[in-house]
Amino acid sequence: MIKDTSLPVLAFTLGDPGGIGPELVLRTLDYFSSGFPFVPVIFGSESILKHSFLEPFCRHRKIIAFNGQTHFEPDAIYFHHSCSLVDFDIKRPTSPNGFASYSYIKEAVKSIQEGHVDALVTAPICKESFQCAGLSFTGHTTLLQHLTGVTNVSMAFHTAQLDVVLATIHVPLNEVSSLLTDSLLKIKVNHAAEFMRKLKKDTIRIAIAGLNPHSGENGLFGDEEMTIIEPFVNGSYFEKDIHVTGPYSADTVFLRAKQGEFDCVIAMYHDQGLIPIKLLGFHEAVNITLGLPFIRTSPDYGTAFDRAYEQLSSIDSMIAATNVACRLAKGE
């Protein structure tokens, strides 16, 4: 595709129609309304834009149907009607909402694969709505992996102070240990290095967090550090610019990274990595999926059904996700 613009074309999926996703997207685009540094393409349902709460955010904007065109009008919003949704419930998970949010993502990915869009920015979806709709995916990460056919993906988080890659994602704590292997950690290190290169880091110093308290205390509190992580760090070969060390006690490694000792931390499980990220940058944290053949970012929070359709939620993380997608799409 040869575009008539040097601006990156960003796909925005509206997320679960019952949550804060539609509002986040429309309010974020309104924030950039003085002049888009990108071409915005919304993937959603026409009925959502016509909702009485959301319609004012669109009232004074030129909205053009998107069909994969290469000519773009300045400061217009493009819209792809991705799923017919006559009636939808707000503030709760439902089967129609789950299918609709799935359809938005599916159509956006298709558009990227066809070369019409450069990067993907996703609003929050609801796992319960997916289950109601008979969809088995546990979140964006597994769905995007399925849609693209890639073997391995990783969930990463970026703030101005801290970058984290998760070794495991949405699994019970009692299953984490059995999933930690030499091959898994190698994938995560390579994805973390890819992440740092995308962010134009001058160094790639990757710290691996321990799984157990005090990183196992020489086997006193668990032996995964001694049997899995240490042998991996000591025995693996990486490119010359990648420096991998660890395991480090999780109660200090994130502080050390924040202070500049490391460029990225690989956390062993979901909450181990997300607690410091959300504590340090709840309103600026960006979720980035690594291993995909395109850029995908999202805000680091959920559907917040209790706050939906009331303009109570901050859009800062969505703005940050948009800026990061724009920056990475331009290779800056």
Image (cartoon, rainbow, N blue to C red):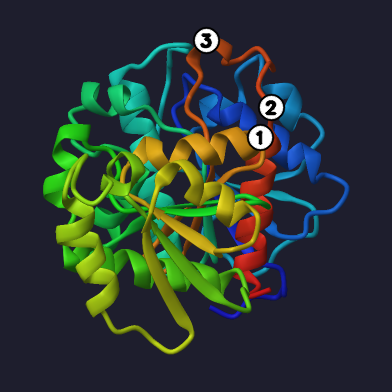
Give the residue pinned by disc 2.
314
Callout 1–callout 2 Cβ contact below 8 Å? yes
The amino acid pointed to by label 3 is Asp
At mark 3, the secondary structure is helix
Question: What is the distance, in whole Å, between disc 1 and disc 2 at their CAs?
Answer: 7 Å
Q: Say whether disc 3 or disc 2 marks the residue closer to the N-terminus.
A: 3
Q: Would you say residue 194 is visible in this rendering? A: yes
Give the residue pinned by disc 3.
306
Q: Quadrant of residue 250?
A: top left
Question: What is the distance, in whole Å, between disc 3 and disc 2 at their CAs?
Answer: 14 Å
Please indicate whether residue 199 sits to the left or right of residue 185 in the image.
right
Q: Nearer the viewer's eye, disc 3 or disc 1?
A: 1
**Camera-side residue: 65 or 207?**
207
Please indicate whether residue 260 sits to the left or right of residue 254 in the image.
right
Residue at position x 41%, y 32% in the image? 125
The amino acid pointed to by label 1 is His
Q: Say whether disc 3 or disc 1 marks the residue closer to the N-terminus.
A: 1
Residue at position x 69%, y 23% in the image? 55
Residue at position x 48%, y 85% in the image? 241
Give the residue pinned by disc 1.
283
Q: Nearer the viewer's eye, disc 1 or disc 2?
A: 1
Q: Quadrant of residue 221?
A: top left
